[in-house]
Image: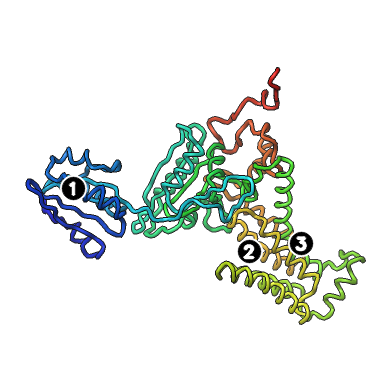
C-alpha cells in the first residue's frame, strides 16, 4: 500500500486539507485532517502535541494513550473518508494499513435557547438547535428510560446528512416503525439540507397540501409523543423534530394546553378549532350570500351592508380576491424582510392599505372586517405547515361559492372530506378517531381531559403497551393521615 493513497491525493485538491509526515526516531506518522472541520484546541493540545511527545511508542499503546475518548482503528477506506469529512484526524503508523481515527470535530453552532415558534409561558424554555447530538441529549434528559432506542442513518449522496429515529421499544408499534425506516432507507436524493425536504419524501402522500407529520422545536413535546407510542425523526443541521403517526387533530393542539388546567386548555383548544373553521368559511360565505343568497341577510344588517357596497364597482368575488391577495402580500413581505422592518410593514401596511381601499371604494367596510378576522384566525394554528394549508384552502372555497353559492361550498366541503378520508400517516388513517370511529379515543381531541383520563394510550397508535396506569386508582387523593 502506498504511503500517500489515492484518497489523499483527491483530498489534497482542497486547500483546507492537511497531510504531513511526522518523523521520529523509530517510525514515521502520517497525519491528515481537514482544518476547517477540526477544533484547533483539541487538535493541537490533545492530538498533535501528544504525538510529538509519544510518537515512538508502539501502535497499540499509542491508540490507548491518546487522550480522546472517541477514537477507533480502521482499514475501511469508506469509513476513513466518512470520518475525515466529519472532523476526525486520521493517523497512519508507518506504512501499516491500519489507521487511528480520532474525533477532533469543531463544535460550531448556537447554544440551547428559548423556542421562537412555539413559545410557552409556563412550560420549559429549551428548544432544539442545529446539532443532532445536542438534540438527542435534550431528549435523553427528558426520557431517561432504558428502552429508548435511537437508530441513525446517513442520507444523501452529497449531503451525507445524519438522520436519527427515536422511539421507545415496547411502546412503539413495529409496523409504523418499520414503515418509517424503510422509507428513509429508500430515499434516493443527493442533497438533503433540511428535515422539511426529507418530510416530503417520506410522507404517505406527497400530492396534497396537508402535512402528515407534525414538526416541533420543543423537546418536551417530543418526549410526550415518544411516551404516547409515536416515533420521532431528527436531522443534523435542522432545529426541528418530526413525529408520527399523527391525525388531523394533532395539528390544532399546542403542547401548552397540557401545562394549563384542563378546563382552560379545553376552552382554548375549542377556540382554536372554531378559528380555523371561521378562517376557511368566512369569505366564501360572504361571496355566496352576496352573489346568490341575499335573502339570507338579516334586516338589521341589510342597510349597513348595502351602504358599504353601494360605491364598490366590483362583484363580491373580485372584491374578496383583492383583499385576500393584499393580506397574502403583507404576510410574505413581513416574512421575507428583517424582523423589525417586517413588523412595521405588517402593521403600517395593513392600516394604510385597508383605509385606502375603503376610501377608494375598492372594497366595503364589512368585507374588510371579515378578511381581517379571517387572517387573524388563521394565525391561531400552532403548526406552521398547517397554517399555510389553511391559507391556501380558502381560495377553492371562494371560487366554488362564486360558481354555485352555498351549494358550491357544500360540494367543496364534501370533496375536502373525501380527500382527508384517503390520507394516512405511516399507514394510519388521517381522520381517526372520527373515521374509523373510536369512542375510546375521543377524550383528547376537541377537549383536553384531566390527567386521570389518560390511563390508556390512543388505540389507533396500536401500542404493544396500551395501558399507562391503573384507572381504578386514578382519582384517589389520600391525605397523609389516611
User: Which sits in the foreground, 339 or 292?
Assistant: 339
Q: Circles 1 and 2: CB distance less than 8 Å? A: no
| Relative side of 14 to 185, left or right | left
> In this figure, which colouring scheme has been used for the structure?
rainbow
Q: Residue 336, percent across and down?
A: 55, 69
Badge 3 density bin: few <14, some 14–19, many ≥20, Cα 10 Å: few
**Residue 18 sits in which quadrant?**
bottom left
Q: Circles 3 and 2: CB distance less than 8 Å? A: no
Q: Nearer the viewer, mark 1 or mark 2?
A: 1
Mark 1 or mark 2, earlier in chain: 1
Identify the residue position indicated by label 2 in the image: 392
Badge 1 density bin: few <14, some 14–19, many ≥20, Cα 10 Å: many
Above or below — where is 262 with respect to 400? Answer: above
Residue reaching furthest to the top? 482
Residue found at x 35% / y 54%: 160
Identify the residue position indicated by label 3 in the image: 407
Residue found at x 80% / y 72%: 365
Q: Real-space Cα distance between discs 3 and 2?
A: 20 Å
User: Which sits in the foreground, 20 or 164?
Assistant: 20
Identify the residue position indicated by label 1 in the image: 51
Q: Real-space Cα distance between discs 1 and 2?
A: 61 Å
Residue found at x 55% / y 50%: 216
Residue found at x 73% / y 60%: 281
| Relative side of 63 to 255, left or right | left
Q: Real-space Cα distance between discs 1 and 3?
A: 80 Å
Badge 3 element: helix
Badge 2 density bin: few <14, some 14–19, many ≥20, Cα 10 Å: some
Amino acid at each position: 500500500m502506498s504511503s500517500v493513497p489515492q484518497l489523499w491525493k483527491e483530498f489534497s485538491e482542497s486547500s483546507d486539507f492537511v497531510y504531513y509526515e511526522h518523523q521520529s526516531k523509530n517510525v514515521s506518522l502520517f497525519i491528515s485532517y481537514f482544518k476547517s472541520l477540526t477544533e484547533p484546541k483539541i487538535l493541537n493540545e490533545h492530538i498533535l502535541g501528544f504525538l510529538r511527545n509519544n510518537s515512538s511508542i508502539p501502535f497499540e499503546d499509542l491508540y490507548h494513550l491518546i487522550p480522546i475518548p472517541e477514537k477507533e482503528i480502521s482499514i475501511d477506506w469508506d469509513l476513513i473518508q466518512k470520518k475525515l469529512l466529519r472532523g476526525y484526524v486520521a493517523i497512519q503508523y508507518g506504512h501499516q494499513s491500519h489507521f487511528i481515527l480520532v474525533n477532533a470535530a469543531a463544535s460550531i453552532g448556537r447554544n440551547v435557547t428559548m423556542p421562537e415558534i412555539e413559545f410557552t409561558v409556563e412550560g420549559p424554555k429549551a428548544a432544539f438547535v442545529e446539532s443532532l447530538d445536542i438534540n438527542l441529549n435534550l431528549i435523553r434528559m427528558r426520557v431517561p428510560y432504558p428502552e429508548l432506542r435511537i437508530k441513525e442513518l446517513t442520507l444523501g449522496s452529497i449531503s451525507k446528512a445524519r438522520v436519527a429515529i427515536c422511539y421507545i421499544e415496547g411502546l412503539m408499534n413495529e409496523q409504523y416503525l418499520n414503515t418509517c425506516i424503510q422509507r428513509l432507507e429508500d430515499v434516493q436524493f443527493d442533497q438533503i439540507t433540511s428535515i422539511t425536504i426529507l418530510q416530503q419524501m417520506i410522507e404517505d402522500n406527497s400530492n396534497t397540501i396537508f402535512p402528515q407529520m407534525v414538526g416541533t422545536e420543543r423537546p418536551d413535546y417530543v418526549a410526550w409523543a415518544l411516551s404516547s407510542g409515536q416515533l420521532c425523526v431528527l436531522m443534523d443541521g435542522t432545529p426541528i423534530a418530526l413525529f408520527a403517526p399523527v391525525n388531523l387533530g394533532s395539528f390544532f393542539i399546542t403542547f401548552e394546553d397540557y401545562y394549563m388546567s384542563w378546563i382552560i386548555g379545553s376552552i382554548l383548544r375549542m377556540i382554536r378549532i372554531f378559528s380555523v373553521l371561521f378562517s376557511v368559511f368566512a369569505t366564501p360565505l360572504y361571496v355566496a350570500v352576496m352573489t346568490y343568497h341575499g335573502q339570507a341577510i338579516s334586516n338589521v344588517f341589510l342597510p349597513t351592508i348595502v351602504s358599504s357596497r353601494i360605491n364598490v364597482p366590483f362583484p363580491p368575488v373580485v372584491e374578496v380576491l383583492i383583499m385576500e391577495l393584499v393580506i397574502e402580500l403583507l404576510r410574505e413581505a413581513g416574512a421575507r424582510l428583517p424582523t423589525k422592518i417586517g413588523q412595521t410593514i405588517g402593521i403600517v401596511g395593513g392600516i394604510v392599505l385597508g383605509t385606502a381601499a375603503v376610501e377608494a371604494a375598492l372594497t366595503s367596510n364589512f368585507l374588510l372586517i371579515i378578511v381581517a378576522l379571517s387572517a387573524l384566525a388563521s394565525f391561531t394554528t400552532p403548526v406552521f405547515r398547517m397554517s399555510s394549508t389553511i391559507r391556501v384552502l380558502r381560495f377553492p372555497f371562494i371560487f366554488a361559492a362564486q360558481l354555485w353559492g352555498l351549494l358550491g361550498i357544500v360540494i367543496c366541503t364534501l370533496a375536502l372530506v373525501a380527500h382527508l378520508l384517503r390520507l394516512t400517516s405511516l399507514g394510519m388513517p388521517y381522520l381517526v378517531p372520527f373515521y374509523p370511529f373510536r369512542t375510546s379515543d375521543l377524550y383528547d381531541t376537541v377537549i383536553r381531559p384531566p390527567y386521570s383520563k389518560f390511563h390508556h394510550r390512543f388505540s389507533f397508535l396500536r401500542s404493544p403497551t396500551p395501558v399507562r396506569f391503573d384507572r381504578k386508582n386514578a382519582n384517589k387523593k389520600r391525605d397523609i393521615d389516611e
